[in-house]
Image: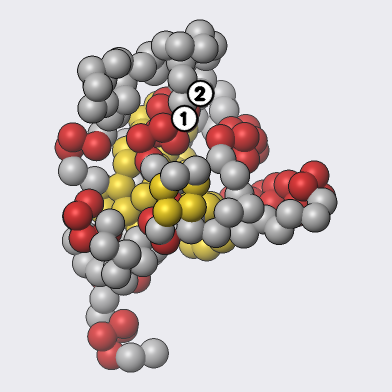
Amino acid sequence: MASSEVNNPALDPDTDTPDDPSHEFAEFGAGCFWGVELTFQRVVGVVKTEVGYSQGHTHDPNYKLVCTGTTNHVEVVRIQFDPKVCPYTHLLSVFWGRHDPTTPNRQGGDVGAQYRSGIYYYNETQARLAQESKEAKQLELKDKLVVTEILPAKRFYRAEEYHQQYLEKGGGQGLKQSAKKGCADPIRCYG
């Protein structure tokens, strides 16, 4: 390992802790983080979501830099959840249902390494459950290869404030989306 990698904080594990010690973190990359965040905001038992960048090699990246494709960061959603209300396996089900895990470095029209599919775990139980869920998804998809990476959560860099809860705030077109728990309305609950 090069000396620049040894002292690179971007490569360190995410050592943040949830606001409540009885809660856990989960982290997913599944395309543009705006819609992914809104999907997880609606899950009962999710107490907080933040969008940001992880898994790259550049310390303290910003959106413009990540979009150049030179940092190897993923647009991620970091979730704080109450495992007594929402098991990690439920979050994995939401993740698999939210995106196409067979397209390398792309989700729909969004193309680039920052849009890759990934599960970034915080403990060995999460790692095992993530791997088991990936194997089940691969069986379900048969001939299509699931390209989702499963790696330890690295340092989380919170995205700029305007990205946080972007669709709930109205996004770029002023069309506010509901983040209400369990929301099922097809228009207000798009995401």
Indicate how the structure is coloured in the image. Answer: secondary structure
Mark 2 neighbour density, 10 Å: few (under 14) some (14–19) many (20 or more): some
Disc ID at residue 43: 2
Report the amino acid beneath label 2: Val
**Count of number-bearing discs:** 2
Residue 15 lies, in percent from the top left, at 34, 57
The residue shown at (62%, 34%) is 97
Residue bearing mark 1 = 40
Disc ID at residue 190: none
Residue 129 lies, in percent from the top left, at 67, 49
Residue 79, by quadrant, is top left
Q: CA distance from mark 1 to mark 2?
A: 5 Å
- Work out whether residue 111 or residue 63 is closer to the camera in this orientation and state it: 111
Answer with left or right where residue 50 lies relative to residue 29: left
| Residue 57 visible, this orientation | yes
Residue 83 lies, in percent from the top left, at 55, 33
Is the Cβ of the residue at disc 1 closer than 8 Å to that at disc 2?
yes
The residue shown at (35%, 61%) is 73
The residue shown at (46%, 30%) is 40
Report the amino acid beneath label 1: Phe
Residue 102 lies, in percent from the top left, at 63, 53
State the SS at label 1: helix
The residue shown at (44%, 44%) is 109
State the SS at label 2: loop
Mark 1 neighbour density, 10 Å: few (under 14) some (14–19) many (20 or more): many
Of all residues, the one furthest to the top in this rendering is 185
Answer with left or right where residue 105 lies relative to residue 155: right
Query: Which quadrant of the figure contains the N terminus?
Result: bottom left
